[in-house]
Amino acid sequence: MPRPLRTALLALLAAALLAPAAHASSKQVMTFEAPGELMRDSDREPTLDEIQRFGVRRVRALVYWRDFSAKPKSKSKPTFDTADPNAYPAGTWDLLDRLVASIERRKMSVQLTLTGPVPRWATKKRKGRVNDPSPKLFGRWARAVATRYGDRVALWSIWNEPNHPEFLGPQYIDDKPHTPRLYRKLYVEGERAIHGVRGGSGDKVLFGETAPIGNANVVSPLRFLRGALCLNRDYEKSSGCKKLRIDGYAHHAYTRRAGPFFVSDDKDEVSIGSLGRLTAALDEAADAGAIASNRGIYLTEFGIQSKPDPISGVTLARQAEYTAISEKIAYANPRVKAFSQYLLYDDQPRKGVPRSERYPGFETGLRTSKGKRKPAYNAFILPLVATRYGSRDVLWGRVRPATATTQVTIEHRIGDGKWKRLTGVQTAGVYGLGTAHRSKHRYRAKWTRPDGVTLTGPPIRAY
């Protein structure tokens, strides 16, 4: 491309990003998930306090069928009406009651994901906790949950990572995907149950909740999507499959250690850097008559894995940068209706095992497992991204929460030099600006909250 044309194109791109940086997804909702703390009575209120101070208004919670049921280890199905929440043993719903009540009291909203593991009696062979759960029994349980909480919950999703063997199986039978068709049946029963409850017809029920990768044990998300919607590789629908009602597609767009711009060679995988694949797949599914058109994407679980995970973790500085970049990617995509942060605290490490086995959970938290704030903590409050376009850097940032117009200060430095004020920006939340690019340039945001506390975001590079 000739230099004058390239320069003009870069200028247009920069101008587009600056207009004012991102009305692309002004209604996009931030969701937070902190399962360990929110499901413990001792930690729930301070955790919700902290989440609410971020300006977050929606919490996601997994509702495990096994944990909110009766006789989960028994082979014998309960004799009572499992579609009636009042028929369950005393105490069945207490923990979920307290969580929903706490969220409602704060005028926040909750997304409930109904999922396995499941009671033993609900599986096809009366063994295990995820293999071949009965769609009809699931539908009855979903109706019980929706009946109890339907007047307080307006956003639901069916099954967490159904393309992952930890939550649904068997993933393959004779080397062919088994869970997509099974999931379709589970979804149909669950969706009908939720929408069939009085007042629930207007609730949204999300399809998918898929994990981002695929391998010999995990069905890749787009292969799973096609199977669940009765589509072949060319997105042609089987004549025997009816159109499904889905109110949105939920996905977990985790990326690899390479960062948010990573794009897998497997075209059926979808990470944050390849969201266009999911958008295109949903559009093709709509064209085939499998679902309605223009379905929104809900990124209901996301985080950047950090050290001390020795295998997948990036440095704490990279975690802060990559989290902000990922949010900006999601924000710039008008099909994305929700983005999320998974974990406030890192999962607890295992003790007495080799270091390579010490961190089997998630280190995606804004705090370490001991509670220390990571750089990602302030980066969550003040996400800032610098994108290089030729001789210019275009900055995208956000102040969380900005309940009214406020001023954020952008500082910069070259190399190891001193931090200097670059500019001040008036914003009601999201902002953008451009500046000259310089080698070894670093930026950071500084903001004084209404309570007088000044926060400084971590330094970031231009990408």
Image (spheres, rainbow, N blue to C red):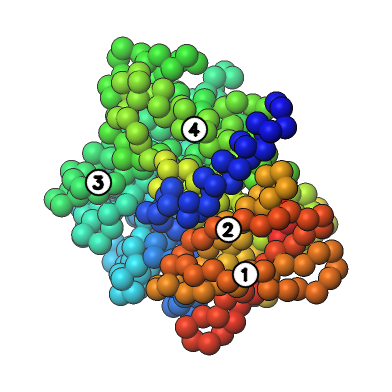
Q: Which of pointers 2 and 4 indicates the residue nearer the eye?
A: 2
Q: CA distance from mark 1 to mark 4?
A: 38 Å
x, y percent for residue 166: 55, 43
Q: Earlier in the sequence, mark 1 or mark 4?
A: 4
Quickly name the residue at label 2.
433
Q: Which residue is mark 4?
A: 278
Which percent across, then down, holds residue 105? 30, 75
Residue displayed at 36% across by 13% down: 238
The residue to which callout 3 is attached is 194
Rendered residue at 55%/80% (across/down): 448
List x then y, in percent, for residue 201: 18, 45
Residue 220 position (above or below residue 97) = above
Query: How far apart in space, not on screen, are marks 2 and 1 (Cα)?
Result: 9 Å
Kind of residue at disc 1: Thr
157 sits left or right of 395 in the view: left
Which disc, if any, is residue 423? 1
Tell me the element at label 3.
helix
Disc 2: CA contacts within 10 A as few (<14), some (14-19) or many (>=20)? many
Instruction: Looking at this view, name the residue that lies furthest to the left.
Output: 198
Is there any visible trace of residue 120 in the rendered image?
no
Q: Amino acid at mark 3?
A: Ile
